[in-house]
Amino acid sequence: MQPETTTKVANNAITKGDVLATARIAGIQAAKRTADMIPMCHPVLVGSVSVNFSIGDDYVEVESQVETVDRTGVEMEALTACTVAALTVYDMCKSADRSMTIADVALWEKSGGRSGAWRRDEHSEDSHTR
């Protein structure tokens, strides 16, 4: 996004309201409704969802962590939370900056479930929602 847009997000100066608070709620709601949106995705009992943001000069990075005690993983819930949060940032900021892009949605780490633990190589390219 344009640096001016990032500044407005950081200063809570977007006319639609508090971008990050709204995006956090949207991401949490999306994680809890993932099975309703993605065919063949198992409904799981979501224990907790966190959605956090880092603001750079020309981007807002979205990170989500989802936990469950269910028998399957919650990767799809975490990825959905990030994606919907990013879409919410776009929606709330589009009147200020239609050139924004959403990019590089990726799983960074998972544990539990049938396939066990997995972690992305730390030398992988940085992922930002821009």
Image: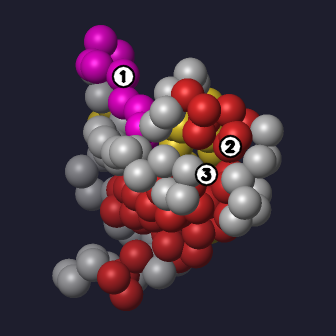
Quadrant of the rendering where the C terminus is positioned: top left
Residue 26 vs 53, above or below: the answer is: below
Q: Check if residue 4 falls in the magenta segment.
A: no
Callout 3 secondary element: strand
Does the residue at mark 2 contact the one at mark 1 (Cβ under 8 Å)?
no
Upstream in sequence: badge 2 or badge 1: 2
**Residue of label 3:** 51
Residue type for callout 3: Val
Q: How many marks?
A: 3
Task: Give the spatial CA distance, label 2 vs label 1.
Answer: 21 Å
Q: Is residue 10 toward the left or the right of residue 48 in the image?
A: right
Q: How crowded is the residue under tag 3: few (<14 C-alpha within 10 Å), some, or many (20+)?
A: many
Q: How crowded is the residue under tag 1: few (<14 C-alpha within 10 Å), some, or many (20+)?
A: few
Q: Which residues are magenta?
A: 122-130
Name the residue located 29 percent from the left edge and 39 percent from the top edge. 104
Residue 5 visible here: yes
**Residue of label 1:** 126
Where is residue 20? Give x, y as percent: 68, 52
* Residue 9: mark in rendering: 2
Name the residue located 78 percent from the left edge and 47 percent from the top edge. 12
Q: Nearer the viewer, residue 46 or 24?
A: 24
Q: Is residue 63 toward the left or the right of residue 121 in the image?
A: right
Residue type for callout 2: Val
Where is residue 113? Give x, y as percent: 34, 57
Residue type for callout 1: Asp
